[in-house]
Image (tube, helix red, strand yellow):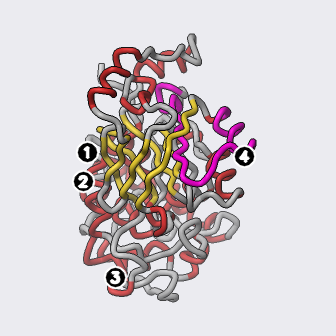
């Protein structure tokens, strides 16, 4: 029932991301109860698809439009559930983009504020050992809503029931898969938003998938201008513990299109480096990413952001709890580099993608198009 407005949404390949967005669509009130975690191969999913078609006709007849469902309260509920489940950083693209189309202003500050007050009540992979199907068997999104009820707004859904109605009727069948607020896995939710001199507009990290040993990190920058160059270095054993891998010019404009750094993060994990190196990018990640993987760095390098000024050997300092990310470089030195910086040649020079690159905004705004 919900067509995502985010330009990057179509390129999401991660099953976790797809499941997360399905769950958030249900939480926003834009799909029928139970849809979010229902198994794709189940007969229940087929039945719900048929019922959804009937419901669409009913909603049209009654003039219930998507904007009447997707209110500020509905988006806050969706972010709350996302944080409680461990969060996919891709939702930081999709939700602001969808909200913009609905006429609701959602920023990265909303994600961070909600994450700080929302406990992580479910440990799903890659941040834990459970799968989305475990959430389904534990009661699905209605059960998650039941646990989170004190933190939710009583928004209306397309089913005709309110969020509170759905939560009150739910049952939690496994209180380790879906924990109570007073027995949460951690006090904060899945995502943290960091700011600093290389990300003045912000960047995101899935903090529930970062080991405690690396939540405070100092590393030496190793800079690459695309994912392919980074992959070559990783697979050639050039990356060592204590390095901060910088992959730039992969943002919405620079890509163009903000592809996932899936190969790099997978290779780092496969080599056993996820607890000792950081990966920073103005691109994005799969929902299955783990370790100190920081994405959506904004403004992106291709648009002149300070992320493009990092050089090999710079010390990178990250403190997730303090929400900080900085290069240990003086402002005077950054200004000197800024004067010498030249934008890279566009990777695409004609057609739709060339136009897109000129008009798209940064990752933290949802990679939406600039206003005319």
Mark 1 or 2 closer to N-term?
Answer: 2
Say which element carries label 3: helix
The front one of 264 and 121 is: 264
**Residue matched to label 3:** 181
- In magenta, the rendered stretch is 228-254
- Residue 32 x, y percent position in the rendering: 46, 64
On whether residue 239 falls in the magenta region, the answer is yes
Inter-mark Cα distance, 1 to 3: 28 Å
**Residue matched to label 4:** 237
Inter-mark Cα distance, 1 to 2: 6 Å
**Residue matched to label 1:** 104
Tell me which residue sits at (35%, 74%) in the image.
Answer: 119
Q: Few, some or many C-alpha atoms within 10 Å of disc 1 (few <14, some 14-19, many ≥20)?
A: some
Inter-mark Cα distance, 2 to 4: 48 Å
Inter-mark Cα distance, 4 to 1: 46 Å
Q: In the rendered structure, are the residues bearing label 1 and label 3 in contact, judged by CB atoms less than 8 Å apart?
A: no
Mark 2 or 4 closer to N-term?
Answer: 2
Mark 1 or 3 closer to N-term?
Answer: 1
On whether residue 241 falls in the magenta region, the answer is yes
- Residue 279 x, y percent position in the rendering: 53, 47
Image check: 222 left or right of 144?
Answer: right
């Amino acid at each position: 029932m919900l067509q995502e407005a985010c330009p990057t949404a179509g390129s999401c390949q991660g099953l976790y991301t797809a499941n997360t967005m399905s769950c958030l669509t249900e939480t926003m009130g834009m799909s029928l109860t139970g849809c979010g975690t229902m198994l794709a191969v189940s007969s229940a999913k087929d039945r719900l698809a048929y019922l959804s078609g009937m419901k669409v006709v009913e909603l049209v007849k009654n003039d219930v439009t998507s904007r009447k469902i997707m209110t500020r309260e509905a988006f806050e509920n969706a972010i709350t559930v996302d944080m409680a489940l461990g969060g996919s950083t891709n939702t930081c693209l999709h939700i602001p983009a969808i909200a913009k189309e609905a006429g609701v202003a959602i920023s990265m500050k909303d994600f961070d504020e909600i994450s700080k007050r929302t406990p992580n009540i479910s440990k799903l992979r890659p941040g834990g050992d459970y799968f989305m199907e475990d959430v389904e068997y534990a009661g699905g999104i209605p059960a998650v809503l039941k646990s989170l009820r004190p933190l939710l707004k009583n928004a209306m859904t397309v089913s005709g029931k309110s969020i509170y109605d759905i939560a009150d009727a739910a049952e939690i069948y496994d209180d380790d898969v879906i924990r109570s607020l007073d027995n949460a896995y951690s006090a904060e939710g899945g995502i943290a938003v960091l700011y600093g001199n290389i990300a003045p507009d912000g960047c995101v990290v899935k903090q529930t998938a970062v080991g405690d040993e690396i939540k405070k990190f100092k590393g030496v920058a190793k800079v690459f201008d695309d994912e392919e160059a980074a992959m070559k270095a990783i697979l050639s054993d050039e990356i060592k513990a204590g390095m901060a891998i910088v992959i730039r010019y992969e943002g919405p404009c620079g890509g163009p299109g903000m592809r996932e750094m899936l190969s790099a993060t997978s290779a780092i994990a496969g080599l056993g480096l996820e607890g000792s190196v950081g990966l920073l990018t103005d691109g994005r990640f799969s929902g299955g990413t783990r370790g100190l993987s920081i994405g959506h760095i904004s403004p992106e390098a291709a648009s002149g952001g300070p992320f493009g000024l990092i050089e090999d050997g710079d010390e990178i300092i990250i403190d997730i709890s303090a929400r900080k990310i900085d290069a240990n470089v003086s402002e005077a030195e950054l200004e000197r580099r800024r004067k010498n910086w030249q934008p890279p040649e566009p990777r695409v020079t004609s057609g739709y993608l060339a136009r897109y690159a000129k008009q798209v905004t940064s990752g933290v705004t949802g990679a939406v198009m600039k206003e005319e």
